[in-house]
Amino acid sequence: MPMASVTFDDAGLAGDPAGGDTFSLAHISDPHIACVADIRSGDLLGKRFFGYLKWRLHRNAEHRESVLAALQHDLADTQPDHIAVTGDLTHLSLPAEFRQTRQWLESLGTPDKVTVIPGNHDAYVKTVWQQTFAHWTDFMLSDEADFGDNSALGFASIFPSLRVRGRIALIGVCTALPTAPHLAVGTIGDRQLQKLETLLARTADRDRFRVLLIHHPPVPGAVSWRKRLTDSPALQSLLARYGAELVLHGHAHKTGLSKLKTPGGQVAVIGVPSASAAGRNPQRRARYFTYHITPRTSGWHLRIAVRVYSPDGNRFIADHEHPFSRLP
């Protein structure tokens, strides 16, 4: 199957190429908005107990509301056309966290301007849909989906999702599922893979720039064994047959840059750090990437701008120290 080519450049090296309408897509992930102030002992049964301890001992100092507030202000200034959030919005998947993250999502934009897929922390334990993911439904549904009675909704009926914005096709994949304590693996599953194959094949022939949104990185070695995507070879096989123009993920809490084979060559697989990380380790400090996608006669041009959190002044600034100049 013939594929349109994608050319890249560093945001600091060139402007948008002449011709065509540019679409800007901001990618953020893993904000880990925790709502533990009024937590009750009954909320901490099973795996949530260990997650709560980890929050108190480590994550509470790293993931800051002040960083998220700075992110909101910066996104309001840069005004991307669309925002993709690739999971782990919550920490313990408590109902109160889903209500709080709903408000946070609304502060970023309306559901037609913001696309969400869940992460492993959002499915930390088995939950009641109406108390949790129902708060995000309109940020996850495909364009053609009937919102209707969301009591009948679930991951199986929503994903893979397809949202088309102009010539950009946002394809959401869910890898979230409850796991045992100390495990954070993800799985796409056979049913979703079958639907994804149909979706990738259908969109490949429509002159679309397809962006695959997934929480777990679909490449080997990006995370440890206990955090891996269990069926990543199956997804890699689909991409090798049907392709995509860009793959975006979270989960690793650091910048990731990999490549996977497609019929047209290689697709960039890019991960972002946590959106709320204050950054005791500067390499893991909060960042978000904005992709400026422009159609060309023979394919697409992709310019990538990186914004990083600066503790000085509690704001996001341009980050020119990033690896994207290595892209083909």
Image (cartoon, rainbow, N blue to C red):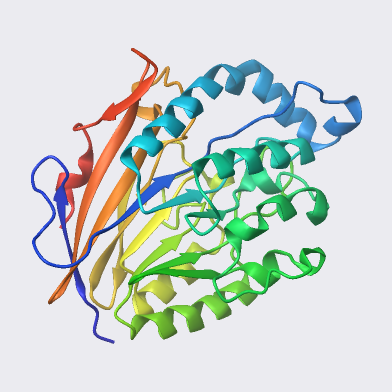
| Residue sitting nearer the eye, 283 or 212 | 212
Q: Which residue is drawn at 17% across and 67% down?
A: 20
The quadrant holding residue 144 is bottom right
> Would residue 292 be visible to someone looking at this image?
yes
In the visual, does 147 lie left or right of 19?
right
Q: Where is residue 158 in the image (x, y as percent from the top left)?
A: 64, 68
Q: Position of residue 194 (x, y in %)?
A: 57, 80
Q: Which residue is drawn at 49% across and 26% down?
A: 69
> Would residue 187 be visible to someone looking at this image?
no
Q: Where is residue 86 in the image (x, y as percent from the top left)?
A: 50, 50
| Residue sitting nearer the eye, 192 or 275 | 275
Q: How many marks?
A: 0
Q: Give the position of the N terminus as an image quadrant.
A: bottom left
**Farthest right residue in view:** 42
**Farthest top residue in view:** 312
In the visual, does 114 lie left or right of 48?
left
Q: Where is residue 134 in the image (x, y as percent from the top left)?
A: 74, 55
Q: Residue at x 80, y 50 (%)?
A: 126
Q: In this view, does 79 lie above or below 149?
A: above
Q: In this view, does 222 lie above or below 236?
A: above
| Residue sitting nearer the eye, 249 or 13 | 13
In the visual, does 31 lie left or right of 273?
right
The quadrant holding residue 75 is top left
Q: Give the position of the C terminus as an image quadrant.
A: bottom left
